[in-house]
Image (cartoon, rainbow, N blue to C red):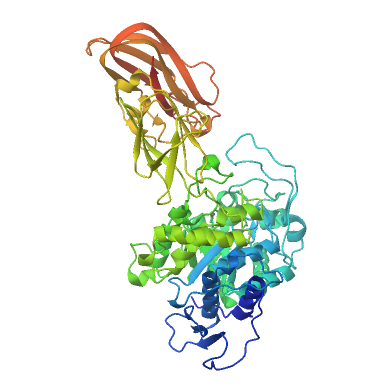
Amino acid sequence: MESFAPFAFDPISVFRDVFRRKSGYAINEPGNVSPKPGTKAMIVIAKATTPVNKEGYSLQVSPSGIYISAANEQGIFYAFQTLRQIMRMDALPDAKGEARTWQLPAVEIKDYPQFQYRGLHLDVCRHFMPVDFVKRYIDLLAYYKMNRFHWHLTDDQGWRIEIKGYPKLQEIAAWREETLVGHYSETPDVYDGVRHGGYYTQEEIKDVVKYAAQRGVTIIPEIEMPGHAQAALAAYPELACTPGPFKVAQTWGVFDDVFCPNEETFTFLQHVLDEVMTLFPSPYIHIGGDECPKTRWKESAFCQDLMKREGLKDEHELQSYFIRRIEQYVNSKGRNIIGWDEILEGGLAPNATVMSWRGMSGGIEAAQSGHDVVMTPGTHCYFDHYQADPAFEPLAIGGLTTLEKVYSFNPIPSKLTAEQARHILGAQGNLWTEYIDSPGKAEYMAYPRAIALAEVLWTPADRKDWNGFVQRLNGHLERLDGWKVNYAKRLKVPAAIIQSGPKGLELTWKTDLPGQSIYYSRDTTGHSWDTATSGESTLFSNPGHIYYKTDNSGIKEINYKPTKTRNATISSSIPPSGSYPGRQGVMTLGDGLTGKAEFNGEDWCAWNGAPFTIGISFDSPTAIDSITLGLLSSTGSWIHLPQSIEIEGSKDLKTYERISGWVPSNLPAGRNQITINTPKTNVKSLRITIYPLKSIPEGKPGAGHVGWTFIDEIGVY
Ligand code: ACM
């Protein structure tokens, strides 16, 4: 990718400005001078004659001055960022009036980036972000030597760029009546009743583009098509396949009403792109392309007829036709398109660059067919995911993408040949803002993960060092404090690998950051803590609460309630599903720990199919008064209580007699603990046969299918 010659790129002014604010000294105007021995310290900038990389630089600090050599302004800018970083001046408050002194280490640095595309994305549609914040976001990413800002400007929930030819985009598409409260998966839906929106005027956009260019950052604008178009359709319903009317979306997800591939739509989009290309000098225009349901196109006589005329075999090829037409238009203006990896489906437009978000496979396919790729896989690059234990974090969309996970990212898949790998331009962190409703929360989600990604993109993979990064990060967190960035402080996820057996509950401690201590306590108030390190194990033989934490985490709690199953062997006639196997297989059912309604495959064992039998064998004859089962009901996820349960016991492990049984009454959603009385039974072995719900009733999700059965614990008392 040829880097666009940024206008008004101004590394020297940007540095002079920061230096004056932080040191209290002004640097003299630049002049064209030769350094003479014995002169006062000065900063000398020279043009590199044999640069290794067009963004590279060398920096020498000695008693006589600071010498920078670079091929162009990009390199000079990065030399200045390094200078700022080694001076640590950004950690200081502004020097108001007084002048400061500090020492600069004598260094000799030769430095250049591994990847040419080093990006951060910001969604301003789900929640509008003010211009000042957008500039601050760009300032920070440039400080960390990133050079692309992907500005997600249009989506179902709002259109955020002024288009002078289409005023209803400003009047209608930029505003929604209200917004969903809480997580999308919660029911019932609750809305805040507050009108939300805004857009950037063309003057504001020009100002931001210039601001970014001064810092070597190219802004890649995204205009979403053919999907994620509901806000535009609310303003111009004639661009849809059905008459409408449409509303600017108030909730999250993927919507069926998308642009219809008719001539009105192409005229509209070409006009929009004309204005966009006038505002943004970027060689790349992002045209979206993701998550476009084909529902309306399938139902539309116009679309079906168009497909016949154009010889398109399905709606994916129709999407490809759509994108190719747009690509042709954008190419005719001397620019190229980038699209999300769905643009591969139905055939990739000839000159398109692919942004691989659904994992790396789209990017691999594109690179193998000779297309350029920017990697943004959800697993490592989605900064809207949780970054630490969700139990203690502000609401996020889901997932868990820790700092360490981001740092571990390698944008080059090992599958690619060296030739194909050259198509991987770099990577980008994405910040979708469904659950990010303020600049402060945006910073919280982006930092410090963006710093980890910046290092992934700058440093050679074999020079990366997680422990070293964590140490250096402390200094960067001080700089973020200096800027009053609301970064996330809870990066240390304490975890316990749980093993249970006859002796009790054994927890093997684990932290995300090296050298971290874990503190644990049995005191219900959690006041007296013992210390362990990652990898150590602790055995808890007595029932009750166990609390644990790290320095920067919330307190996690386990309630250990072993029953007579603790000394039993548990088996099942059919193993639980591979997706929900339990942390110790079916032995999980006797580990003394219960699960939560937000189910996972550690606490819960699950089955989906034929009736199955759980066997529980004791070492010696055991008196039993009751049996409890923890069962989940979550009908939205096809999880139902069983149709019935039968319990048999044996004294000799040969003959079994029915002891008791159970059928469900009206139990609430969530985890239910049921008790089956078995007064004064003496057995060596139990057989518990579970009959799953054979057919989910009409009107419920998954109607007609067998219900899933989820069990977390079987207690024997
Ligand atoms: C995306 O996250 N839908 C690109």
Where is residue 131 drawn, in percent x and y?
70, 63
Q: Is residue 501 above or below residue 419?
A: above
Side (left or right) of 259 relative to 82: right
Side (left or right) of 518 relative to 179: left
Where is residue 152 drawn, in percent x and y?
61, 61
Instruction: Give the camera-side residue of 365 and 513.
Output: 513
Residue in the picture at 52% in, 77% down: 79
Where is residue 53 drawn, in percent x and y?
44, 80
Count of numbered circles on the image: 0
Q: Is residue 468 above or below residue 77?
A: above
Quadrant where ligand 1 appears = bottom right
Instruction: Give the camera-side residue of 411 and 343.
Output: 411
Where is residue 74 drawn, in percent x and y?
54, 78
Residue in the picture at 72% in, 66% down: 163
Residue in the picture at 44% in, 36% down: 520
Q: Report if residue 354 is visible in the image.
A: yes
- Residue extending farthest to the top is 680
**Residue 569 sits in which quadrant?**
top left
Q: Report if residue 221 is visible in the image.
A: no
**Residue 611 sits in which quadrant?**
top left
Q: Assign the C terminus to one quadrant of the image.
A: top left
**Residue 660 sits in which quadrant?**
top left
Residue in the picture at 50% in, 28% down: 524
Q: Is residue 552 above or below residue 132?
A: above
